[in-house]
Image: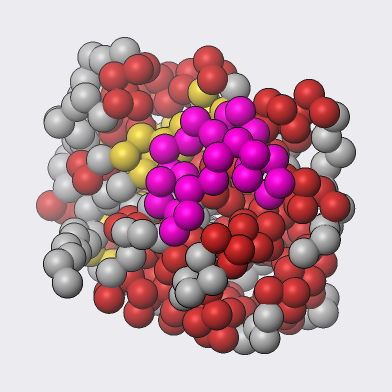
């Protein structure tokens, strides 16, 4: 068996890790652009203050770009890149959930490359500003991945930039920033991390190291999802577990990629404003039914067992209880969703590649909730 593993990020995990390890920032440059969301959560949870204090401590000048919206657009990252160029930033610091981290990576590209949008998504670049990542949610794993996911109105969908150049150089994971996340966001992000581990474990690109990480992430997240389904608020210990599991799942998809749930879930997010993780959770049961029918000898039962489920129905019941009633779709919506998903490159990561008829069936099962 031949396989390859690449994980260049320096990871610091635990409470207070930014101030304890601020010296690592001195190697990044003398001017930073700090990228965060427009909602203000990074101010409320203390992450923005901590990283800016650490920059000041290291005598690194910085400017703030706090205009990133959920599911960031190409227009937003272009504006951020322009500010990075004007300020002559040496590196980019992303602070927040998946959206600010993904935006920070795209800004790091555009700040160093005069390229078209199509060239951006095609990965036609080499010079990229270094990125420091400070995740404040437990779901995306973007702090260790080679992906930046942006909303691209030209294709009415989200689209991925993939390059090893945008894997963050440093990641500070402090569970304290996640302690006061609302329950609905906690559920959404936990399901996102679950989907990363689950899709990555089943991926044709999986390898022995990714499988170990995926199974451990599933083992950790499964019981947490069960508690959430019982309306049990995660305590500080639970929050730390979720952040660690999200990190592991991010490392998994860095090598395996995602597959059908992400490909189909993006349309629920773009057209129906369903949060990304929740959209994945809607699709996972029907995707699993498809894989069981096409590949009865797949590793799926190992994934269920690791997460604490006894069957597909057991997993489906839990995920669907957490995701709630799916957004209503018209026949035209269904046609558009299937057509968009059929063009997704990550379908090739699935152990069985669905055609349009298969995707239509997956969508029908999702909407009818009948496994």
Picture layout, residue 370 above or below residue 95: below
**Does 185 appear in magenta?**
no
| The C terminus: image quadrant | bottom right
**Side of 275 relative to 368 (left or right):** left
Specify the segment rendered in magenta. Answer: 338-362
Q: Main secondary structure of the magenta part?
A: helix
Residue 36 visible here: no
Q: Quadrant of residue 113?
A: top left
Picture layout, residue 277 above or below residue 344: below
Picture layout, residue 328 above or below residue 291: above
Residue 313, how many percent across, how many down? 75, 74
Residue at 77% x, 46% y is 364
**Does 361 appear in magenta?**
yes
Residue at 33% x, 65% y is 206
**Side of 75 relative to 190 (left or right):** left
Residue 259, how many percent across, how many down? 48, 51
For this rendering, which residue is in front, 300 or 163? 300
For this rendering, which residue is in front, 138 or 161? 161
| The N terminus: image quadrant | bottom left
Residue 66, how many percent across, how many down? 51, 34
Q: Quadrant of residue 70?
A: top right
Residue at 64% x, 34% y is 338
Residue at 60% x, 36% y is 356
Residue 366 visible here: yes
């Amino acid at each position: 068996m031949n396989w390859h593993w690449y994980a260049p990020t320096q990871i610091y995990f635990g409470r207070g890790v930014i101030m304890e390890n601020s010296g690592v920032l001195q190697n990044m440059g003398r001017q930073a652009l700090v990228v965060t969301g427009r909602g203000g959560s990074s101010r409320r949870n203390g992450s923005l203050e901590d990283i800016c204090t650490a920059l000041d401590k290291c005598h690194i000048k910085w400017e703030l770009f706090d205009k990133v919206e959920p599911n960031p657009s190409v227009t937003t990252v272009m504006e951020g890149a322009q500010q990075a160029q004007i300020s002559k930033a040496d590196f980019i610091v992303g602070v927040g959930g998946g959206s600010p981290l993904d935006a920070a990576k795209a800004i790091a590209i555009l700040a160093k490359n005069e390229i078209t949008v199509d060239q951006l998504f095609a990965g036609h670049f080499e010079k990229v500003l270094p990125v420091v990542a400070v995740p404040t949610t437990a779901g995306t794993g973007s702090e260790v991945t080679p992906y930046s996911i942006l909303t691209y109105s030209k294709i009415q969908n989200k689209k991925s930039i993939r390059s090893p150049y945008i894997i963050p150089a440093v990641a500070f994971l402090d569970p304290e920033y996640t302690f006061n996340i609302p329950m609905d966001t906690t559920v959404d992000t936990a399901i996102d991390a679950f989907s990363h581990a689950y899709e990555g474990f089943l991926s044709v690109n999986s390898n022995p190291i990714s499988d170990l990480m995926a199974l451990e992430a599933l083992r950790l997240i499964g019981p947490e999802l069960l508690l959430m389904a019982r309306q049990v608020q995660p305590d500080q210990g639970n929050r730390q577990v979720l952040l660690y599991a999200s990190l592991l799942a991010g490392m998994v998809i860095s090598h395996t990629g995602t597959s059908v749930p992400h490909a189909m879930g993006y349309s629920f997010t773009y057209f129906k404003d369903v949060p990304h993780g929740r959209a994945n959770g809607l699709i996972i049961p029907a995707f699993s039914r498809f894989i069981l029918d096409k590949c009865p000898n797949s590793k799926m039962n190992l994934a269920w067992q690791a997460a604490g489920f006894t069957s597909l129905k057991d997993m489906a019941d839990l995920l669907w209880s957490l995701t709630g009633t799916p957004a209503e779709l018209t026949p035209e919506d269904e046609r558009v969703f299937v057509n968009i998903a059929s063009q997704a490159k990550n379908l090739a990561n699935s152990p069985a590649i669905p055609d349009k008829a298969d995707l239509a069936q997956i969508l029908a099962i999702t909407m009818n909730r009948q496994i």
